[in-house]
Image (cartoon, grey):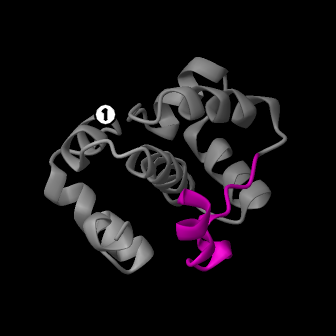
Amino acid sequence: MLLDQIASVDVDSLELPIPEDPRLKKIYDHLSATPSDTRTLDEWGHILGATGRTLARRFRLETGMSFGQWRQQVRILEALRRLGMNEPVTTVAIELGYDSPSAFISMFKRTLGETPGRYFK
């Protein structure tokens, strides 16, 4: 069922390019496991020994999107997986790091064109 739902959306909008740079790969590995992490690129840079600007340039170069756009893709893909398993919207929203269910629903609708409830009907 989830695959049917994903197939109905523009595939490009759901693409998550995986960076090759070892520093970015560490961010990818962490956010894939913990999509609610809200660290900035400056904070990641401090951890990984690079500036936030360097990481931002590398993200744009390797993924074709900003770090914020890329992180949103991580979250939307995880949201689709969880909602497809009938997890409540409120639970998904909070566990993915959104301030409120309404903020999550707004992002979901902006990204996929429908609210979660309509998307999974």
Amino acid, disc 1 = Glu
Tell me the quadrant of the picture where the C terminus can be found. Answer: bottom left
Specify whether residue 14 is painted magenta: yes
Q: Position of residue 106 (x, y in %)?
A: 24, 67
Q: Identify which residue, 24 or 7, lies in the foreground.
A: 7
In this rendering, would 71 be left or right of 114? right
Q: Which residues are magenta?
A: 1-18
- Number of marks in the rendered image: 1
Question: Height in image: 86 above or below 119?
Answer: above
Q: Position of residue 52 (x, y in %)?
A: 56, 40
Name the image quarter holding residue 10: bottom right
Question: Height in image: 36 above or below 15?
Answer: above
Tell me the quadrant of the picture where the N terminus can be found. Answer: bottom right
- Rendered residue at 60%/47% (across/down): 53
In this rendering, would 21 be left or right of 12? right
Q: Identify which residue, 97 or 78, lies in the foreground.
A: 78
Specify whether residue 10 is painted magenta: yes
- Rendered residue at 67%/44% (across/down): 54
Label 1 residue SS? helix
Q: Identify which residue, 73 or 10, lies in the foreground.
A: 10
Question: Height in image: 62 above or below 43?
Answer: below
Q: Position of residue 67 (x, y in %)?
A: 55, 52
Q: Which residue is mark 1?
A: 95
- Rendered residue at 46%/36% (across/down): 35
Q: Which class describes the residues within 10 Å of circle 1: few (<14), some (14-19), or many (20+)?
A: some
